[in-house]
Image (spheres, grey):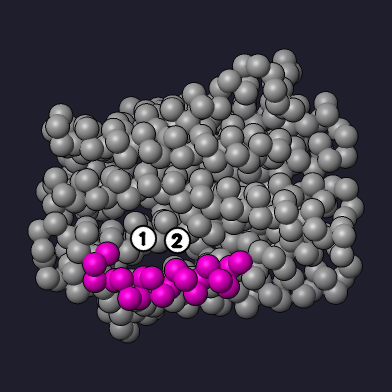
Amino acid sequence: MNRRKPVLKDFLKYVSLNILGQMAYSCYTLADTFFVSSSLGANGLTALNLAFPVFCLLNGTGLMIGMGGGTRYSIAKSRGENERADHIFTNAVYMAACFAVLYVLSGVFLSGKLVRMLGADDTVFSMTNTYLKVMLFFAPAFLTNNLLQCFVRNDGKPSLSMAAMISGSLSNVILDYIFIFPLRMGIFGAILATGLAPVISIAVLSPCLISKRNGFHFMKSVSDAKKVRNIMSSGIPPLVTEVSSGIVMFLFNFIILRLAGNIGVAAFGVVTVISLVVIAIYTGLSQGIQPIISQNYGKGNAADVKTILKYAMRTVFLLSCVIYAAIFFGASPIASVFNSEGNETLQTFAITGMKLYFLACPFIGFNIVTATYFSSTGRPRPSQIISFLRGLFVLVPMAFLLSAILKMTGVWCAYPLTECIVTIIGMIFYALTEKSR
């Protein structure tokens, strides 16, 4: 019993700080959506929603590198392999630099084609293109911010990581208001504020890096293909978690455009922005348990690893009850916040959508935590399978099947049914892995 007390203390510290940080981080989307819908109406909301899958991909890439590298770094550190830990950080930096160049070049040369692929018509093409182009220009800042926050957290400084996330998010809200309303910069102002937020977050982290008060250091060495593969292998689950949000948006936008037009997409934008906050809470939980699971796994403390997982699952259940109750009873006022034009069709779609879509809450939490547990204990394969099933292989056929049968109701129900099916598969994986030990 004495051994579990510090585990509970670490769990509460890391999880609470990371959930708070991730909730603040999700203010990126809330601020953009609220201010854009207030100033530009349904068309602005549609443009934002169409461009956002690319943001999910960009953010997911940063988390893949940061959490994948952070997991490997934490295990190496817990085993006293300091030089190996520095090599892992160095390779993560190389990866971030390569992806940053790729994203910036895509913004410069391919943004128009990407916007058309995302489904923008002539009404919203210009706004969507502006948002996407500026977002990709800031890719180096987004990737660097994700990388540093994950390594700082795994280096035993969750408070600093949270402070950086909150600073960036608050600055985004303030700059959003200034750029969109007093300066009347429209959609460009919205994405400029979002792009500057990670720059401010990096500035908060920089004193720790400059003063060398950290356990990770950049080394002058060439990239190691094996370490890059290991980082990517451990980082695929958070990447797929983020990308699945983008896939859901892209796929549902495509289906909803045919069923209900731009107003339907705008209503889905309301559901999506709430979804990103919900997923951020569960992501904060998973990011909180990752360092302490990896540390205890590296030290061979199997009992403590199981205890942490038990605490996490109980937390998922409690959070899910609170979240769904808030959404179910607050659906109408929530939709009204993002419906500045008072469009009755948008309001009806959004209310129904929220009540059905967020039945997925407990299953989302279970799947994200389970995937993190497997990757944090050196078993990336089941983690990858869970992530791909929920983000692609179950979701896509489910969305097309249910929307064909039940129209918009089927669209809203596809996501919770997918997460439920993947939860059952995840439970089977866990039972099999525990039996084989």
Residue appearing at x 85%, y 74% in the figure: 435
The type of residue carrying mark 2 is Val
**Which percent across, then down, holds residue 264?**
21, 66
The stretch of residues the image draws in magenta is 315-334
> In front here: 384 or 352?
352
Q: Quadrant of residue 422?
A: bottom right
* Element class at badge 2: helix
Count of marks, rendered view: 2
The dot on residue 278 is: 2
Q: Is residue 225 magenta?
A: no
Q: Residues within 10 Å of mark 1 (few under 14, many from 20)?
A: many
> In front here: 294 or 226?
294
**Which percent across, then down, holds residue 235?**
63, 46
Do the numbered discs 1 and 2 sit on residues whose CB atoms are within 8 Å?
yes
Pointer 1 residue: 274
Q: Compared to 204, does 63 lie above or below? A: below
Report the side of 272 relative to 295 (left or right): left
Q: Compared to 2, does 62 lie above or below? A: above
